[in-house]
Amino acid sequence: MINQIFKLPFTRKLKLNESVDRNKISEEIKQISSDIERLEESNQSLNSMVNDLQFKISKNKKESERLFKKAEEQKNILLDLRTTENSILNEINFLEEEKKSFEEKYNIFLEGLDKNILKLDKSSKEIDFIKGETGLLIEKMSSLEEKVPEKNYDVENINDTIFGTVKSLKDIYGKMLNLEKKVKINYYKQKKQIEG
């Protein structure tokens, strides 16, 4: 259509010395009118093309704006996801450190518990030994009292020995109670630290 505009035939100009021919003038006027009509049609077509292009440009602009807005939204979502990911990674690192600390405390607690159990076992054996010794001394004292009641000296020695043994037994029993108390306090303290 645009090519047609530039290829329109133009009427020739009359020279001054040419004679005027009414028929030729009429034909040229018709030709000019026809050229004008074709120019107007071309102009309308161009206007239509321009309007179509403007519509397409406007449509593409709106689509571009929509896509840009969507891209910004996706970018913001991605930033939020990265922030959340970093937060989760920090939380995981914190929990790993807590787990490590918990394991260390738990191992220390177990080590202390093992030592306390060994101490209790040792104290228990000592108590059993003293009980056995006390029983033997009581039997010996009873036997001596039955056989030789007049030998007060031996009886006094035996009584002193029994008294010393009972005192030792009470001391060990007190130590055992003390140890048991410490074990319980240590146990509940460690348990509270582990659970808390």
Image (cartoon, rainbow, N blue to C red):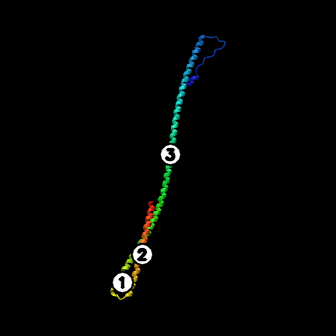
Q: Provide the residue designation for mark 3.
A: 78
Q: Earlier in the sequence, mark 2 or mark 1?
A: 1
Q: Earlier in the sequence, mark 2 or mark 3?
A: 3
> Which residue extends farthest bottom?
150
Give residue 11's mark: none
Circle 2/circle 1 CB separation < 8 Å: no
Say if 54 sits above or below 24 in the image: below
Give residue 141's mark: 1
Where is residue 71 drawn, in percent x and y? 51, 41
Q: Determine the secondary structure under disc 1.
A: helix
Distance CA(mark 2)–CA(mark 3): 70 Å
The amino acid beneath tag 3 is Leu
Where is residue 9 drawn, in percent x and y? 59, 19
Q: Determine the secondary structure under disc 2.
A: helix
Distance CA(mark 2)–CA(mark 1): 23 Å
Where is residue 19 drawn, in percent x and y? 64, 10
Kindly indicate the quadrant of the structure image that contains residue 191: bottom left
Residue neighbourhood size for the residue with mark 2, other residues' Cα within 10 Å, grouped as few (<14), some (14–19), many (≥20)? some
Q: Determine the secondary structure under disc 3.
A: helix
Q: Provide the residue designation for mark 2.
A: 172
Residue neighbourhood size for the residue with mark 3, other residues' Cα within 10 Å, grouped as few (<14), some (14–19), many (≥20)? few
Which is nearer the eye, 12 or 92? 92
Q: Is residue 117 visible?
A: no
**Quadrant (top left/top right/bottom left/bottom right) for the N terminus:** top right
